[in-house]
């Protein structure tokens, strides 16, 4: 299929609340092509998740797959591939956990975001079948990050201390300095 251009922060499509799919639309050939294009785009970008609005399609669709081979998130354990239509999030544990998040639509920058530790996501899969999954820890944060795109939000909207926003190359330099100090 075809890699798509990823929209960047500032594009108004990223701030829209995406519309739902109906079952017939999920099963359509057009949606199969959209999904193939999204997976190609995600692989080429080296990401772990992508929402349809990020490629200019304001629809309730996201894909997620963690890989232990991810350059952007090397600490991530491999997960199954998720195709998520029309999701609903239910918070199961209000305790917050924080991770350094980045986004293909906000390239080169990371920010520290705290999100609920345990959630349930009810959604339709690529066969328009109802699914429900309970998620914790990093995968819960990834789902919340990707599903925020479907309601017009970016992770930078969830950063409580903008002083934590940092360019990725600066973050790497700081990590290297800290590693050198630990060896002394």
Image (spheres, rainbow, N blue to C red):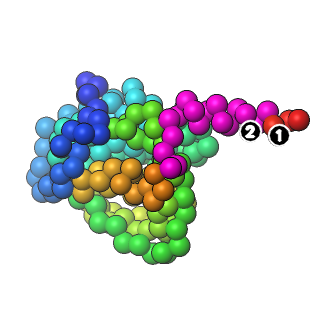
Residue 113: image x %, image y %?
48, 56
Q: Residue at x 34, y 42 (%)?
A: 50
Residue 169: image x %, image y %?
55, 30
Q: Residue furthest front?
A: 163
Asked whether 139 or 27 is in front, the reply is 139
Per the image, the residue denoted by label 1 is: 182
> Is residue 91 shown above or below 137?
below
- Find the magenta span and give its range: 163-180
Q: Residue furthest right?
A: 184
**Residue 173 inside the magenta-drawn segment:** yes
Do the numbered discs 1 and 2 sit on residues whose CB atoms are within 8 Å? yes
Residue 133: image x %, image y %?
41, 64
Residue 98 location, quadrant: bottom right
Q: Residue at x 29, y 35 (%)?
A: 8
Q: Residue at x 20, y 34 (%)?
A: 33
Query: Can the viewer see residue 26?
Result: no
Per the image, the residue denoted by label 2 is: 178
Residue 29 location, quadrant: top left
Residue 104 lies left or right of residue 24; in this view the side is right
**Residue 105 inside the magenta-drawn segment:** no
């Amino acid at each position: 299929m075809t890699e798509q251009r990823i929209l960047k922060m500032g594009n108004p499509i990223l701030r829209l609340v995406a519309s739902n799919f109906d079952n017939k639309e999920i099963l359509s050939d057009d949606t199969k092509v959209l999904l193939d294009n999204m997976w190609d785009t995600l692989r080429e970008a080296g990401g772990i998740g992508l929402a349809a609005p990020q490629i200019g399609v304001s629809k309730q669709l996201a894909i997620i797959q963690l890989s232990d081979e991810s350059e952007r998130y090397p600490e991530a354990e491999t997960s199954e591939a998720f195709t998520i239509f029309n999701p609903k999030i239910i918070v199961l544990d209000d305790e917050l956990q924080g991770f350094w998040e980045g986004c293909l639509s906000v390239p080169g920058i990371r920010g520290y975001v705290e999100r609920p530790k345990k959630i349930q996501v009810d959604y339709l899969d690529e066969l328009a079948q109802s699914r429900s999954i309970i998620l914790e820890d990093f995968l819960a944060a990834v789902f919340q990050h990707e599903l925020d795109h479907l309601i017009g939000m970016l992770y930078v909207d969830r950063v409580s201390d903008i002083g934590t926003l940092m360019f990725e190359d600066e973050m790497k330099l700081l990590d290297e300095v800290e590693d050198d100090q630990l060896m002394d």
